């Protein structure tokens, strides 16, 4: 019993010194809090969960830049880790709804299971086919620069810190403009 207690004490001291070094280096420990994998849920877009005074954690996502008022839009939250970001089936909460922008924008409320670092991915399926196509658009939290060679930004570029309340972000949709596939013949 004394050996286990001694080992626990040593591990505690190592962890405390590591955290002190991180804090001294200007790195906030809260930003490094890992997010445990939660059960995936398709949820309704309930904006009451992001209203003034609402309990979080949640992300209020305002999406703009729509090139069409057709199809469906999907908003997904992922843990902001290299292992989970944009990986199939690794999302936590998903809202999938018909496109209906007002004033060129749509708002979504994405509740999350706990505080921590997350990334938000938005996809506009312009024709509503459920499959990615050349006319579809997308965007990410922090609005990282995208190119044809880099359509999948890193978890680090999209990570947002979500605290106990409601975190507000804006996502601007990007489209593969000027690129279309025309049938032969």
Image (spheres, rainbow, N blue to C red):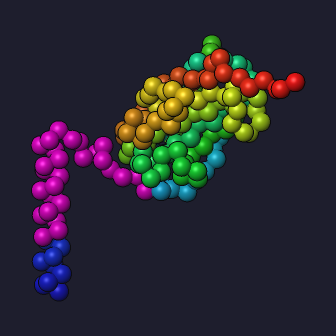
Which residue is nearer to you in this view: 136 or 65?
136
Position of residue 123 measured from the top left corner of the image (x, y, whole percent): 62, 33
Q: Which of 156 and 11 is in front in this view?
A: 156
In the rendered view, would you say 110 is above or below 83?
above
Q: Main secondary structure of the magenta part?
A: helix
Q: Can residue 14 be seen here?
A: yes
92 or 58: nearer the viewer: 92
For the C terminus, the image quarter is top right
Q: Quadrant of residue 161?
A: top left
Q: In this view, does 162 lie to the left or right of 99?
A: left
- Would residue 46 appear left or right of 53 to someone viewing this image? right
Span of residues in magenta: 10-36
Percent across and percent down for residue 45 are 62, 36
Q: Quadrant of residue 98?
A: top right
Q: Is residue 145 magenta?
A: no
Q: Is residue 109 visible?
A: no
Q: Identify the residue shown where x is 54% and y is 28%.
A: 148
């Amino acid at each position: 019993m004394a050996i286990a207690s001694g080992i626990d004490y040593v591990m505690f001291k190592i962890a405390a010194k590591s955290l002190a070094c991180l804090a001294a280096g200007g790195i906030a420990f809260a930003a490094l809090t890992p997010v445990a994998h939660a059960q995936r849920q398709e949820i309704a877009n309930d904006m009451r969960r992001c209203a003034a005074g609402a309990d979080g954690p949640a992300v209020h996502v305002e999406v703009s830049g729509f090139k069409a008022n057709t199809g469906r839009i999907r908003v997904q939250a992922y843990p902001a880790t290299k292992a989970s970001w944009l990986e199939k089936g690794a999302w936590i909460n998903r809202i999938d709804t018909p496109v209906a922008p007002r004033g060129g924008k749509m708002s979504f409320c994405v509740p999350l299971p706990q505080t921590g670092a997350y990334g938000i991915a938005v996809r506009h399926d312009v024709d509503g086919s459920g499959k990615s196509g050349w006319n579809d658009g997308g965007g990410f939290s922090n609005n990282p620069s995208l190119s044809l060679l880099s359509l999948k930004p890193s978890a680090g570029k999209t990570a947002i810190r979500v605290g106990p309340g409601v975190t507000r972000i804006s996502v601007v949709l990007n489209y593969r403009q000027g690129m279309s596939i025309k049938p032969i013949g």
